[in-house]
Image: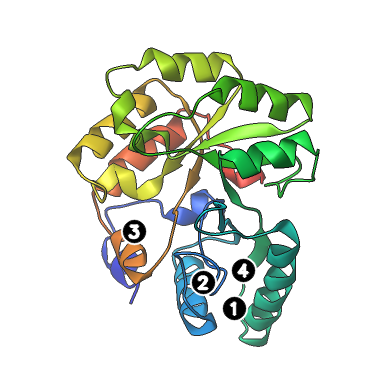
Amino acid sequence: MFSFFKKKASFDFDYSMLVTDMHSHLLPGIDDGAPDMSVSLQLIRGLAELGFKKFYTTPHIMWDMYPNTREDILVRIVELRNTVKENNINIDVNAAAEYYIDEHFRQLLDEKKPLLTIDKNMVLVEFSLASPPLELKEVLFEMQLQGYQPIIAHPERYLYLEHSKHFYDELKDFGCLFQLNLLSLGGFYGRAVQDFSQYLAKKEYYNLVGTDMHHLRHLQGLQDVKLYEGMQRILDSGTIRNANL
């Protein structure tokens, strides 16, 4: 399935340079990602064959739609880790979450409940693709006060901010990290998202890269040759931290 990388000898790097995929939805049956364990294993095998050595699966915690809890995710990741080991797949399996900034997330912060983190203290957050949340900066500031490093998931997909690019400058000045969806570089989400990702890449605003993998179409999309030039430029910027996770 992945002989693409062997045949395209003109490309001198693959995803092994990233080492870690830090945004994916591979925990079975918990959100809009892998529906069951067999699909999880297919996607995880695909990641391993693409060169990844480690991944964080980051299921949605979006209370109106995916009311997942830290405790449930930690139980399920043990099951997935054991199954991966039983199937002799050589990849390091970890779990965090993709927190949607809503009232439930604010409540978790208010009650100082422990959040699921990537590495030591990084927390992946997202918000509406249609409009920005109220009091976003206040929420991000409270995260920082509690010792968390906010990561803004796929900022290139918030197209309503295309004409308010200063908002991204403010988020960077505020201390947020930005995570690129790798497929954005190849136009998987449309030309506008692709252009926006190139704009943020030229600003050297990206710090982390994830596949945001949900299903087999995403896995196939990672074989798109158009991803390579953009990915190489981003890696050359020296801002990407995946290999150190």
Disc 2: which residue: 44
Q: CA distance from mark 2 to mark 4?
A: 8 Å
Q: Which one is in front in this view, the residue at disc 2 or the one at disc 4?
A: 2
Is residue 53 positioned above or below 34 on the image?
A: above
Cβ–Cβ below 8 Å for labels 2 and 4?
yes
Mark found first going from the N terminus, 3 or 2: 2
Q: Which mark is residue 89?
A: 1
Q: Position of residue 176 (x, y in %)?
A: 58, 26
Residue 198's image quarter?
Answer: top left
Viewer-closest of 222 and 64: 64
Disc 3: which residue: 222
Q: Is residue 159 left or right of residue 241?
A: left
Q: Amino acid at mark 1?
A: Ile
Q: Position of residue 219 (x, y in %)?
A: 36, 65
Viewer-closest of 48 and 58: 58
Q: CA distance from mark 4 to mark 1?
A: 6 Å
Cβ–Cβ below 8 Å for labels 3 and 2?
no
Mark found first going from the N terminus, 1 or 2: 2
User: Residue at image x 66%, y 65%?
Assistant: 92
Regarding mark 4 in the picture, which secondary structure is present there?
loop
Cβ–Cβ below 8 Å for labels 4 and 1?
yes
Q: Amino acid at mark 4?
A: Ile
User: Residue at image x 65%, y 75%?
Assistant: 80
Mark 1 Cα within 10 Å, few/some/many (few <14, many 20+)? some
Q: Is residue 42 left or right of residue 59?
A: left
Regarding mark 2 in the picture, which secondary structure is present there?
helix
